[in-house]
Amino acid sequence: QVQPVESGGGSAQAGGSLTVSCTASGGTFSHYDVGWFRQAPGKEREFVSAIYWIGGRTNYADSVKGRFAISGDNAKNTVYLQMNNLKPEDTAVYYCAARNTYRVTWDYWGQGTQVTVSS
């Protein structure tokens, strides 16, 4: 099994960019889907984006489509979420999650990394 470990994040002005990274600890992301989720204060955790092992297909929430880009580097065993044109409503704790590509539930979660966007 893998343990996702997030890094990056931090603070940015509205309109700026940040990148968060997710690295597999204790294994590799081979045959795993990797997703990003976020949770803002007082709100439920929501899906942001995912990259799927089979075919490398990607998926985005409507709220970030066209602004965020997910990508993977197999050599570094890392998945990146490039966030552009950030908005204050993107402020949240961002979590990386992984699941075996044949499963439905996201079984492995990172500890989260804070992203704060000021207006």
Image: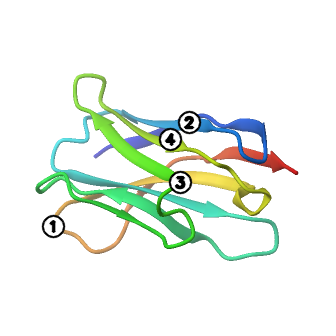
Give the residue at mark 1.
Answer: 102
Q: Distance between the residues labelled 3 and 2?
A: 12 Å
Mark 1 or mark 3, which is nearer to you? 3
The answer for how far apart the CA atoms under marks 1 and 3 are is 28 Å
Q: Is residue 20 left or right of residue 88?
A: left
Q: Residue at x 50, y 73 (%)?
A: 62
Q: Do the residues labelled 1 and 3 touch (CB within 8 Å)?
A: no
Q: Residues under labels 4 and 1: Cα distance?
A: 26 Å
Horizontally, is 61 left or right of 89 in the view? left
Residue tagged 2: 19
Q: Label 1 vs label 2: CA separation? A: 28 Å
Alpha-carbon span between mark 4 and mark 2 = 4 Å
User: In the image, residue 53 lies at what x, y percent?
Assistant: 18, 52
Q: Earlier in the sequence, mark 4 or mark 1?
A: 4
Query: Which badge, 4 or 3, is on the more N-terminal residue?
Result: 3
Residue 67 is labelled as: 3
Badge 4 or badge 2: first in the primary sequence: 2
Image coordinates of residue 34 in percent, x first then y, are 34, 52
Binning the other alpha carbons within 10 Å of mark 1 as few (below 14), some (14 to 19) or many (20 upward) gives few
* Residue that appears at 79% across and 57% down: 88
Near mark 4 (Cα within 10 A), the count class, few <14, some 14-19 or many ≥20, is: some
Earlier in the chain: of badge 1 and badge 3, it is 3
Q: Badges 4 and 1: C-beta atoms under 8 Å apart?
A: no
Foreground tag (3 vs 2): 3
Q: Circle 4 — which element?
A: strand
Residue 82 disc label: 4
Residue 6 in picture, x, y percent from top left: 53, 38
* Residue 71 vertical placement versus 103 (above, below): above
Which residue in the rendered view is the most extreme toward the top?
75
At label 1, the amino acid type is Tyr
